[in-house]
Amino acid sequence: MIDDLAGWPAFARELHATLPTQSQYVLWGNAHDSYLIDAPTGVRLLSLTDVIRELLDRSGYTFVLDHDLIDSGAVHQIGRSEVTTATRALLDDGYRPGGPTPDLGALFVQLAAIAQPRTNVRAAAIVRAAHLLRHPSDPDDAERQFLRRMEKLARTARPVAAESGRTQSLYNPVIWLVENESDLPAWLTAGKDRIRVISLPRPDYGDRESCARRLLHGQIPDATLHERARSFAEQSEGLTLQGMIEVTRLARDRGLSPEQWPDATRTFKLGVLDNPWRRDYLPTRIRDGERSLPQRIIGQRQAVTKTLDILKRAALGLSGAHAARASSRPRGVLFFAGPTGVGKTELAKAVAHVVFGDEAAYLRFDMSEFSAEHAGDRLIGAPPGYVGFEAGGELTNAVRQQPFRVILFDEIEKSHPRILDKFLQILEDGRLTDGRGGTVHFSECILIFTSNLGMYVDDGTGQLTPTATPGTPYDQVEAIVRAAIEDHFTRVLGRPELLNRLGDNIVVFDFIGPEAAEQIFELQLGNVLRRLSEEHHVSVTLDQPVHARVLRECTRDLARGGRGIGSALETALVNPLARALFDRLAATAVDAPAAGDATSLVVTAWRRQADVITVELS
C-alpha cells in the first residue's frame, strides 16, 4: 500500500515510490532548505533530513544513520523500536555514535551493514557528501576505492521485506546529499540502474506563497492574509523557504510590521539597511533634473525627457508593474542609441548624480573589451578550478559591495553574443549567479546600455558609409536606429528575447544641431579659460573676430558631436595658445605672477598656414 503523499514535495514522492527498486539515491541542489509538508493535520515546515525520516517512517523503517564530515554518524530513531536494539542487530558492536569521524573504510563498513542487513531490519543511511572528496573529478586512491565499493554495494544490496505496512521488499537505501551533482563523479551515478539521481529545486512561487501564508498566519487579519502572502512571495523571488524564515526573524528583530516585510526582504538580499529609492528628497532631485539635465546634456531634449520618465517610474516602484506578479527586475533599464559624441555617456553619469547624489555610483564597462567569449568571466568570475576563481567578477563584486548603482555597458554591440546571454537573467529576474555560485541582486540598480547601431552601413566594399548626417530630421534618425537595433538583435544575434526585455526603453539621441554646437563650444571654451585662471593665474579673452573664427573652425563638422567639438577646440585653440603662453611665461619667469595675482591677456589674432595654427597675445 502506498501512502497518500499529495501534499509532499515531488522529490519525496519520487523517493517513496522507488524504494522497491533503488538502493542508493543522490539528492542534489537545494539541500539546506526547509520544505513544506501539507498533511491533513496542517502545513508544516521541515528540514530535508526530517522530511526523509518521516517519509521512511511511513514505510516501516526503524532508524537513519546520519553521517557528515564533522561529526561521526548520528543514529536517529524513526520507528517505535529501541534504537540500541536495532543498531546492535545491524551495525558492528564496536560502533559508537558520537565518536570520532570514521575514515572512508570504516564508513563503508557501516553503510554496507545497512544496505546488506543480516536481519530483517529496515534502516537507511544519509551521507552528506558535499566536499567528501578532495576533487570529485580526480579522487585519490582511498576515495576511488571507497566509491568503487559503493558502486558495487548498489548492485549487491539486499531488499528487506516486512510483515506489516509496506510488506513488499524495500531496499535499505544510502542517500547521498550534495549541493552540486558534480560533487560525486559521473561514473558512479550515470547510467546505474540501482542509483537514482533526484534534483532538489529551489521553491517556486506556489511554495513561497504557501510558506508566506504560514509565516503570516496570526500576524495580520485574515481579510488581508491572501494579499500580504502574495506580496511577500513575490518579493522573495530567488529566496529559499529557509531564507523567508530568516527574513521574518530579521523583521521582528528590527521591529517591522508585516506591511514592512518587503524592506526586510531587501535588507536580507542586499545587506543594506538604507534605501536611496525611499529617500524623501528623491522626487525633488528628479524634478530639479528636469531643469538641470537639459543644460548638461545639450540638444537632446527628447532623450532627456524619456530618461526622466523612466526615472520617475523607477522612483515610484512601477517598473514592470504591468505584470501579473511583481518581480525583482532592475529599477530601471535604458538603451541609449544614436550618433557618437552626443551625450549618451554623459547622461548616464547625470542619472547617477540625480538618483544617488554621487557620480561614484556610476560604473562603466567598455564592452569592446568583451569581444571574446571567455571575457565574460571578467563580469561574473572564473568558474571553479580556473585561475582567478577566488577573485570573483568585476560586475558581481561591484554590485555586491554597492547594490545601488547606475551600471553603463558602453557599445554593447561590440561584445560577444554569448556574453549578452548573461543580461537575460538580469533583465528578467534581477539577479545573476557568479562564478563562485553566489547570487547577486540587481533589483536596485539602473542598467544603461549604449550603442551606435544604425549610424553606419557597409557599402559592400568594406567601407562604412553614414545612414544619416547632421540635419537629418529626428524622426528619420529614430526610425533608422530602431530598425537597425531590431535587425541586429533578431537577425544578426538571434536574440529577439533580449530585445523584447528592453521593451520601449530604447532612447534615441539626435545629432548635435548648430545651436547646440555653439552652446557646447562656449561651455568647453569656458572650461579651458577657467582652468588657466585657477591653475596659472592667467586671464585670457578672445577678440570677437578671433572668437568667431575659432567657433566656425570647431563646429564646421558636427558628425562627431560634442566630442568632435572638443577635439577641434584642442587643435584650433588650446595647442597654439599653450605654445604662446609657454613662451611668454618662460621668457618672464622671474616676473611670473605670484599666487593671488593675475595676468590678463587677449588673443588678438588667429591664423592658419597650411596645418600650422598660431595665435597672437597682447
Image (tube, grey):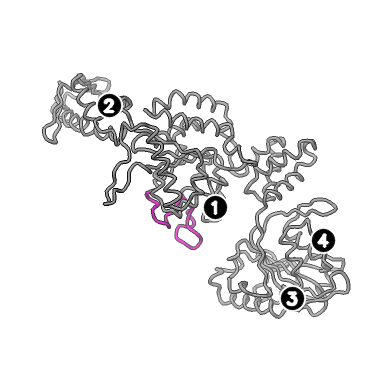
Q: Secondary structure at mark 1?
A: strand
What is the magenta range?
368-393
Q: Quick one: label 2 or label 1, which is nearer the N terminus? A: 1
- Residue type (three-letter) at the residue carrying disc 3: Ala
Q: Comparing marks 4 and 1, which lies closer to the viewer?
A: 4
| Residue under pointer 3 | 115
Residue 509 locus on image (x, y percent): 39, 34
Residue 292 locus on image (x, y percent): 43, 24
| Residue under pointer 2 | 525
Q: Secondary structure at mark 4?
A: loop
Q: Tell me if mark 4 has few (under 14), some (14-19) or many (20+) residues whose alpha carbon lies within 10 angstroms of its own.
A: few
Q: 502 or 164, which lies in front?
A: 502
CA distance separating discs 2 and 4: 81 Å
Q: 248 or 543, which lies in front?
A: 543
Magenta stretch contains residue 325 = no
Q: Secondary structure at mark 3?
A: helix
In the image, taking residue 618 as reference, residue 454 lies left or right, namely right
Q: Tell me if mark 3 has few (under 14), some (14-19) or many (20+) residues whose alpha carbon lies within 10 angstroms of its own.
A: many
| Residue under pointer 4 | 4
- Residue type (three-letter) at the residue carrying disc 1: Thr
Q: Tell me if mark 1 has few (under 14), some (14-19) or many (20+) residues whose alpha carbon lies within 10 angstroms of its own.
A: some
Residue visible at 76% across and 57% down in the picture: 8
- Residue 433 badge: 1
Q: Quick one: label 1 or label 3, which is nearer the N terminus? A: 3
Q: 445 or 342, which lies in front?
A: 342
Q: Quick one: label 3 or label 4, which is nearer the N terminus? A: 4
- Residue type (three-letter) at the residue carrying disc 2: Leu
Residue 71 locus on image (x, y percent): 69, 64
Residue visible at 41% across and 53% down in the picture: 416
**Quadrant (top left/top right/bottom left/bottom right) for the C terminus:** top left
- Residue type (three-letter) at the residue carrying disc 4: Asp
